[in-house]
Amino acid sequence: MLKQLQQAMLGAVYGDAAGFARVAAGLAPATVDPVRALYLHTATVTAALTGVLAQAYPAVHAEMGEAAFATLTTRFLREQPPALPVLSAYGAGFADLLPPSLQGMARLDWAAHQAYFAADAQTLSPAALALIPPDRLGGLDLRPVPSVSLLAGVAPDPWLPLRPDLAVVINPFESPPAGALIWRGPDLRVAACPVDGGVLTLLTGLAAGQGLLAAAESALAAGLLDLPAALAFLLNQGLLTQPEDAAP
């Protein structure tokens, strides 16, 4: 009985009318009317989760305005209540409720949010890479650090002015940007940078477990103009993990 009542209570605070009615009927009379008390509890949960989503999607929040954002977040939390007891993990899928014009911005916001809470990893330095024998470089397993997100076809320029909290890295490549790269730097600040198709292909290949040579060949075929410059950028920004086979 208690378990069923707890489940009904959980449904009630997320907008389930039947659960609300069942819980309200089972509450003992008190100084505060039980229905009113349950409404207050529901409003508190709604406000708290709206705040969580506003922190995860600050650019979308700023672009939509308080009222429109609150309306949409209320719908989201009714349809998708938290599945994990970790508030930093709540909010995935919110972009699907937005109009197409805001979905790219939401994806960028969520990538930055995930980058901040991503796991740490030991990064590969240019000096460590230089110590690896040349005959081992081609098959070297270089993976992006856990905080890296690649968003192909998403232009970060309209989004960046709405995120003064981020470290903006100037695009170091001459080719037109083909997407966005987001990561957490060694200083624990989330950074963002537009990148071209060659760099996107290089990082995508490395993330998929391709060796350095195979990923580089794909990137060059995709238009990467300067492989050494691209690798120097990735290493200097702390974007590649120290592989197990990196020891000379």
Image (spheres, rainbow, N blue to C red):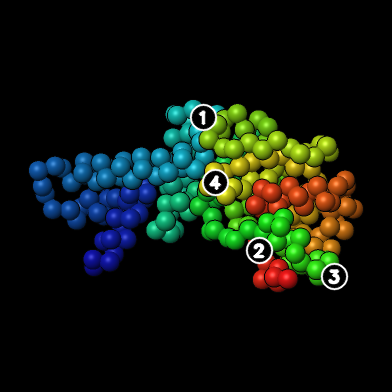
What label does residue 187 carry, if any?
A: 4
Rounded to the nearest angstrom, the CA distance separating label 2 from label 1 is 38 Å
Q: Residue at x 22, y 50 (%)?
A: 24
| 2 or 1: tag closer to the N-terminus | 1
* Foreground pick, 140 / 199: 140
Q: Quadrant of residue 179?
A: top right
Q: Amino acid at mark 4?
A: Asp
The residue identified by callout 2 is 242
Q: Quadrant of the C terminus?
A: bottom right
Whichever of labels 4 and 2 marks the residue nearer the N terminus, that label is 4
Instruction: Report the residue at 76% width, 39% height from top.
Output: 172
Cα–Cα span, label 2 and label 3: 18 Å
| Residue 184 place in picture, x, y as percent | 58, 48
Kindly identify which residue carries mark 3: 135
Q: Is residue 162 left or right of residue 194?
A: left
Residue at (63, 58) in percent of width and height: 123
Tell me which amino acid carries mark 3: Asp
